[in-house]
Image (cartoon, rainbow, N blue to C red):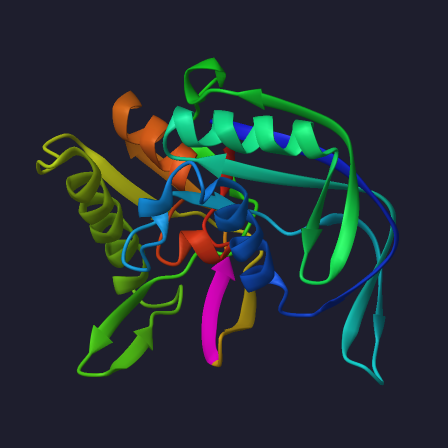
């Protein structure tokens, strides 16, 4: 389930790397209903950045959000998304970090309602990583292992969720176009993601699955959300 939220901020100050705060807000909203979800080794949702008017203040290294903003949160399971929407509607507002935002509008769509194409646009940077010992190695788009790791990550998440290996077609292809590097800090760890033009050649089942949870690693930290072009 993908949830589209319109919110309003009078004056909301957030750090540049506010994604961990968004992750905590989502967990805290549904934790009483699903206490088992707080698991760092699995992703149950993903999200993009807050979109709207923001100003960077160099002295405090924070972002000032004002006015109407939009935010998209996507859940792997419908039941989690339904409860998340219900709790936000009941409260009429929510808090990210110490800042409060008013809820103006909320709607949702299911993956099956979306027209799927092979060309996709990333709404949040994709992370291709592998653990080497105790260190994390991040792949770059000029390395063929970048898309290979995105494919392997998708199969791993599928197997974790469904309890069986994915046996269908899956090919992620890097298309020509603009490439942007994005480095964020997540609880002291520097995370390197990339916004790149991609094609997703796979079954409808896998496309639906990835649309809900995102491509690549660290989805619950705000990475890998995409839309079909």
Q: Residue at x 70, y 34 (%)?
A: 91
Observer able to see residue 48: yes
- Between residues 177 and 58, which one lies in front from this camera angle? 58
Asked whether the viewer can see residue 203, the reply is no
Q: Position of residue 182 (x, y in %)?
A: 56, 67
Image-based side of 6 in relation to 124, left or right: right
**Residue 194 appears at what percent x and percent y?**
49, 61
Figure check: 210 above or below 21? above
**Magenta segment: does it hold 190?**
yes
Please count the marks in the image. 0
Picture layout, residue 5 above or below residue 147:
above
Coordinates of residue 166 in the picture (x, y in percent)? 13, 35
In the rendered structure, the answer to whether residue 170 lies left or right of residue 40 reads left
* Among the 4 quarters of the image, the one containing residue 33: top left
Q: Judge left or right: residue 6 versus residue 17.
A: right
Q: Is residue 137 above or below residue 23?
A: below
- Tell me which corner region of the image, top left, top right, bottom left or bottom right, holds residue 3: top right
Q: Which residue is at a point 75% across and 33% down the rendered structure image? A: 92
For image coordinates 27% across by 58% down, the residue present is 41
Which region shows up in magenta? 189-195
Query: Which of the 4 quarters of the picture holds residue 148?
Result: bottom left
Residue sticking out furthest to the front: 32
Residue at screen point 49% across, 36% down: 74
Image quarter of the C terminus: top right
The magenta stretch spans residue 39:
no
| Residue 10 horizontal side relative to residue 152, left or right | right
Q: Main secondary structure of the magenta part?
A: strand
In x, y percent, where is residue 105? Answer: 75, 26
Residue 65 drawn above or below residue 189: above
């Amino acid at each position: 389930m993908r949830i589209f939220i319109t919110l309003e901020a009078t004056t909301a100050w957030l750090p540049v790397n506010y994604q961990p705060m968004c992750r905590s807000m989502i967990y805290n909203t549904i934790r009483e209903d699903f206490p088992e979800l707080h698991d760092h080794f699995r992703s149950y949702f993903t999200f993009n950045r807050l979109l709207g008017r923001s100003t960077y203040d160099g002295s405090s290294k924070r972002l000032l959000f004002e006015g109407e903003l939009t935010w998209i949160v996507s859940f792997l399971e419908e039941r989690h998304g339904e409860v998340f929407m219900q709790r936000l509607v009941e409260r009429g507002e929510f808090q990210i970090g110490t800042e409060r935002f008013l809820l103006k509008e909320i709607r949702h769509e299911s993956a099956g309602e979306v027209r799927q194409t092979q060309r996709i646009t990333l709404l949040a940077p994709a992370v291709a990583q592998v653990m080497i010992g105790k260190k994390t190695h991040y792949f770059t788009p000029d390395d063929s292992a970048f898309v290979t790791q995105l494919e392997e990550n998708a199969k791993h998440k599928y197997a974790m969720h469904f309890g069986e290996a994915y046996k269908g077609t899956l090919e992620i292809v890097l298309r020509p176009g603009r490439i942007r590097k994005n480095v964020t800090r997540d609880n002291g760890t520097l995370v390197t993601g990339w916004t790149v033009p991609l094609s997703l050649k796979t079954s409808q089942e896998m496309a639906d699955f990835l649309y809900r949870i995102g491509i690549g690693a660290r989805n619950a930290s705000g990475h890998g959300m995409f839309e079909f072009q």
